[in-house]
Image: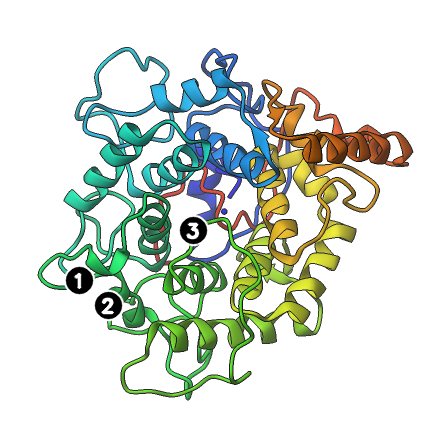
Amino acid sequence: MNVRRSAAALAAVGVLAAAAPATAAGPSPSPKVTLPSGLYGKGDPTNDGVWRQSLTLLAQRTLGYRPAAEAVDWLTGQQCANGSFAPFRAAPAEPCDARTKADTNNTAAAAQALAATGGHGAAVTKAVNWLRSVQNKDGGWGYYAGDPSDANSTAAVIGALTAAGTDPADVRKSGRSPYDALPAWAVPCDRDGGGALAYQKGKKGELSANADATAAGLLGALGKGFVAEAGRAPAKDACVAAGHLTRQQLADNAGAYLAAAVTKTGHLTSTLAGAEDQPDFGNTADTVVALAADGRTAPAKKAYAWLEKNAGQWATQSGPAAYAQLILAAHAVGEQPGDFDGTSLVGSLNALGPAPRLDSGEHQAAEKADKADKADSKSGVWWTVGACLVAGIGVGFLLSGRKKRQP
């Protein structure tokens, strides 16, 4: 799931998740628009408003919180009449037109979030109907309607369909479903990066392993969205060659690739031209969720342990979507987000917008424990986010401007 960064940052990187890029941390620009009271985060929402709000609501529901009405209302108010969502609409009362850059990723994220909050079936149905209307003939989706299909967008839409109660296998264009599209990006076992998924095929049909696309594709192959729990362990740990990969084989091969990628250091890395490799926090968090969903709990927990020791500052700098992503990683491996190396991911996220409420006495007890965690924390200062949020390294699913392109 990446901390959707400014258009300038995206242009400098070239590709977001397709290349799993990293950027140097620095102060984010002051918002160019007035921040709505229901929106989480203080950074400019132009490129990531819907995305960070959707991830926040999903994380809160996963923890048992009922999101604040104004936070949910802000998200529903961003929807266009045709059901789609753009990254941010400063004047939601005005109708969407040709200048509104609606896309599949923000629409899929919003659909998952609104399905999780409940009571917004009409909005979810409209979003899914729009997604169905822009499906490509290969069964997949591109970032914008009409773009060539890519693994990340296709996986995001699968998550939205599943959240809406629709079987992705039944959503077809020219007889092909998204499950037919995913294997086209699978790197054969006998090639470099075997088992991984590419974001898209290259101009000559080549497939380049991409960790973010692999994590997304794994979840998509399992029919899961951004929220996942530990699954059954795969029958084999290595990449399994097959003429026609089944969904489970594709997921298991992707899991084998990701497990190997985090075995030595516990994390993924990102590289920019002329720069040294740097830890990729966002894509590592995505990998935790994917590995757990594929039943590879040992490497998933190793990567989560690395995040717990190293990702605190990244989350502080990056904002709501990063906190949400770490919470979803904790959920996937059964860890407590209320104590993330002495700080509270829960309190940190909830402090960035309107306060949610807890649904039950059980979660009220959890909230008390969370407050105790924060009181005992030696690093409690950093969980209160300052006025300036900065873009972090390796934003994984978090899609700020989030148009993904093959480098």
Q: Nearer the viewer, mark 1 or mark 2?
A: 2
Residue found at the far left of this picture? 174
Q: Reply above or below: 149 against 315.
A: below
Which residue is found at the position 34% from the left and 59% from the top? 151
Tag 2 or tag 1, which sits nearer the N-term? 1
Front residue of 405/132: it is: 132
**Gap between marks 2 and 3, in whole Å?**
18 Å
Contact? badges 1 and 2 (CB < 8 Å)? yes
Q: Which residue is mark 1?
A: 138
User: In screen coordinates, is 378 left or right of 305?
Assistant: right
Write down the residue under mark 3: 225
Element marked by disc 3 = loop
Residue 278 found in image quarter: bottom right
**Residue 98, image x and y in percent?**
17, 26
Viewer-proximal residue, 118 or 17?
A: 118
Residue 372: horizontal and vertical position, in percent? Answer: 86, 32
Q: Is 203 drawn above or below residue 242 in the view shown?
A: above
Residue type at numbered disc 3: Gly
> Can you tell which of label 3 and label 1 is closer to the viewer?
3
Q: Is residue 395 visible from the viewing direction of this image?
A: yes
- Provide the secondary structure element on which disc 1 rests: loop
Q: How crowded is the residue under tag 1: few (<14 C-alpha within 10 Å), some, or many (20+)?
A: many
Going by the image, does 376 lie left or right of 333? Answer: right
Q: Which residue is mark 2?
A: 180
Say whether disc 2 or disc 3 marks the residue closer to the N-terminus.
2
Residue 139 appears at what percent x and percent y?
19, 59
Frontmost residue, 112 versus 404: 112
Counting other residues with Cα less than 10 Å from the Cα at mark 2, is it few (<14), some (14-19), or many (20 or more)? some
Q: Earlier in the sequence, mark 3 or mark 1?
A: 1
* Count of all numbered marks drawn on residues in the image: 3
